[in-house]
Image (tube, rainbow, N blue to C red):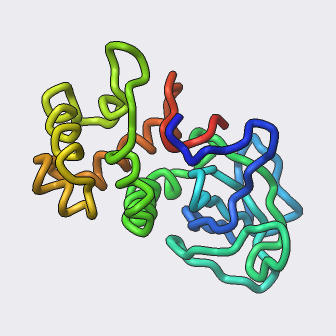
Amino acid sequence: MFREEESRTSKKYEEYAYILDYLPQGRLGSQKPAFRGEGLVQMIGGTYFTLLEAIPRRDETLQIGDMVYVGKKGRTQISHIIGRATYEDLTSTAKLELPDIIETMIRSQEQRFLKFFNESQSITPRMHAMELIPGIGKKLMWQVLNQREIKKFTSFEDLKERANLQDPVKMLARRVLDELSKEEKYRLFTRPS
């Protein structure tokens, strides 16, 4: 929906990902197959919020919250990507860590998310994209729209003060989490799994 303009024909891959859970012995007691006793890493991509599973390089110790390179060439910590995961595939630990890591990612990409507040449009004649953000109803949406007409938002703090949004980062993180964990008709920041 609002993601950066991306070609429908070319695939987009994550370059970096954040570790949600590291299982040194691999997946135990799961319906999914284990991979020869190798370690397993569950991650979230830094750009498209893609949930991924990967095999770390031998003798590599990874920490939850670490950002690792997962691009096509030159990986040093990840041996190979197994594939995309769904929210249901995540371990309890990964699900617990996910909200905080999403907030960290949003804070580190402040200008990208401010662009949403500065440029988002109506989705239908009766609904604006901003209304898909938890906590933003018609009244707050109009405050944001009126304030952005006066002057574009320059920071989350600016957005908070001028549009009376309590915590834009938490609101955005809740939307991303909803897109990852539920069947959403409209996707603002993630790709379908």
The picture places residue 82, in percent across and down from the top left corner, at 81, 55
- Whether residue 143 sits left or right of residue 89 in the image: it is left
Relative image position of residue 184 (x, y in whole percent): 50, 26
Position of the C terminus, as image quadrant, is top right
From what the image shows, is residue 150 above or below residue 41? above
Quarter holding residue 79: bottom right
Q: Residue placed at 27% from the left, 63% from the top?
A: 154
Instruction: State left or right for residue 110 relative to residue 17.
Output: left
In terms of depth relative to the viewer, which is nearer, 101 or 144? 144
Establish if 17 lies above or below 118: below
Residue drawn at point x = 55 percent, y = 62 percent: 20
Residue found farthest to the top? 125
Q: Which residue is drawn at 69% across and 66% down?
A: 15
Residue 57 location in percent, x, y? 80, 78
Q: Residue at x 73, y 68 (%)?
A: 70
Image spot of residue 192 (x, y percent): 63, 35
Asked which quadrant contains residue 101, the reply is bottom left
Q: Which of 43 and 27 is in front in this view?
A: 43
- Residue at far front of view: 150
**Residue farthest to the bottom?**
59
The answer to whether residue 102 is left or right of residue 11 is: left
Front in this rendered view, residue 22 or 85: 85
